[in-house]
Image (cartoon, rainbow, N blue to C red):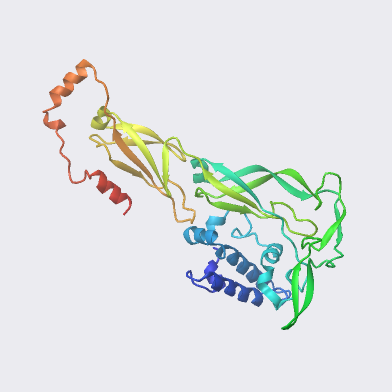
Amino acid sequence: MKDDFYDILGISKNATAAEIKKAYRKKAIEYHPDKNPGDSNAEEMFKKAAEAYEVLSDPDKKARYDQYGHQAFEGGGGFGGGGMNMDDIFSQFGDIFGGAFGGFGGFGGGQRRVKGSNLRIRVKLSLEEIANGVEKKIKVKRKKVAAGTSYKTCTTCNGHGQVTKIQNTILGRMQTAATCSTCQGTGQIIDRAPAGADAHGLIAEEETVSIKIPAGVVDGMQLKVSGKGNDAPGNGVSGDLLVAIEELPHKHLQREGDNLHYDLYVSFSEAALGASKEIETVTGKVRIKIEAGAQSGKILRLRNKGIPSINGYGTGDLLVHVNVWTPKTLTKEQKEFFEKMKHDDHFTPKPEKEDKSFFEKVKDMFS
């Protein structure tokens, strides 16, 4: 089981954005590879702290984590999915270390590694796919470094990706650093590039990406596949592929959290005499028994026939709502039969204590 992100940073769930950033900087400096050369445990803690900060520093991701835990980010790798790497950490959070180490790139002041842009796609899933989990193969057009492209050190910044300026002010000499405008912070410029490549040596190519989607995802949830966005020029790291989940409506089932609802219509005869009915679930068809004398509005609960919890806290139920169908037209013989039954004691409503009202049933469902 993965460590809790709040425990990793040593903060409470009510920590402010400033407190989260301060806690991460403290952990990052404590476990920085420059400070702990060759220490694999420190490197692992360094990665865990960055992973925790990446989620908790983003209000949307933090809200999903608070609600669903680690499984809210499973299936896509990258931050929140256990696929951490040093390139991601230093390209995104290097500035948080400030002047504690050699430079923004980490590892003793190496050049900054620019990250390529992210790509976003939407994946439509059926309720069955959400219930069982699925692996999708999606074609994505992403920018990649063109074959035959070579780079050389930027002469403007000497490969550092930044240029330093010193200005004389009334407060004394002030030093500022800015991203190099020649190489856009990569520290490298194109030496040679094939025809068709853009000004950064990149070319758009279609690639099939495999995405593992865990069971129980929610409409609007976003997964991340690390390194499957656009490449960065030079020695940069690739961006990420952000996958938004879209839940398709089901023909017979309605989702409510991890529970599912099914409207089952039965005839007068079936309600009075009892019946065996086949209904659809997300794991296949099942047959259920309708007891003789079933009342309209009765709810049958099929345990664990709903959606698995994204947190791993079990599986929801399937609630079957029994509705007695009243025919809109009757034959002469049928009308005569029901006329005779108007005053028959068997047809007189006699609700018992267990025959709850509609409002009581709704109350029970949400209690």
At 25% from the left edge and 48% from the top edge, which residue is drawn?
360
Instruction: Tell me the quarter of the picture where residue 341 sits.
Output: top left
* Residue 102 seen anywhere in this rendered image of the structure: no
- For the N terminus, the image quarter is bottom right
184 is higher (above) or lower (below) than 245: below
Q: Which residue lies furthest to the front in this view?
A: 170
Residue 202 at x, y = what percent? Answer: 79, 50
Question: Which residue occupies the foreground of this view, 234 or 301?
Answer: 234
Q: Tell me where residue 330 appears, x and y as whole percent.
A: 24, 20
Q: Residue furthest top?
A: 332
- Judge left or right: residue 171 versus residue 296: right
Which residue is the extreme one toward the right?
A: 192
Quadrant location of the C terminus in the rendered image:
bottom left
Residue 5 vs residue 277, the one in the foreground: 5
Residues 13 and 189: in front is 189
Q: Which residue is drawn at 17% across and 43% down?
A: 352
| Residue 230 can be seen in this image | yes
Q: Position of residue 317 (x, y in %)?
A: 39, 47
In which image quadrant can residue 79 be found?
bottom right
What is the count of numbered marks? 0
Q: What residue do we see at 67% from left, 65% from top?
A: 89
Question: Percent position (x, y) of residue 249?
Answer: 47, 39
Residue 229 shown left or right of residue 356 in the figure: right
Position of residue 95 relative to residue 322, above or below, is below
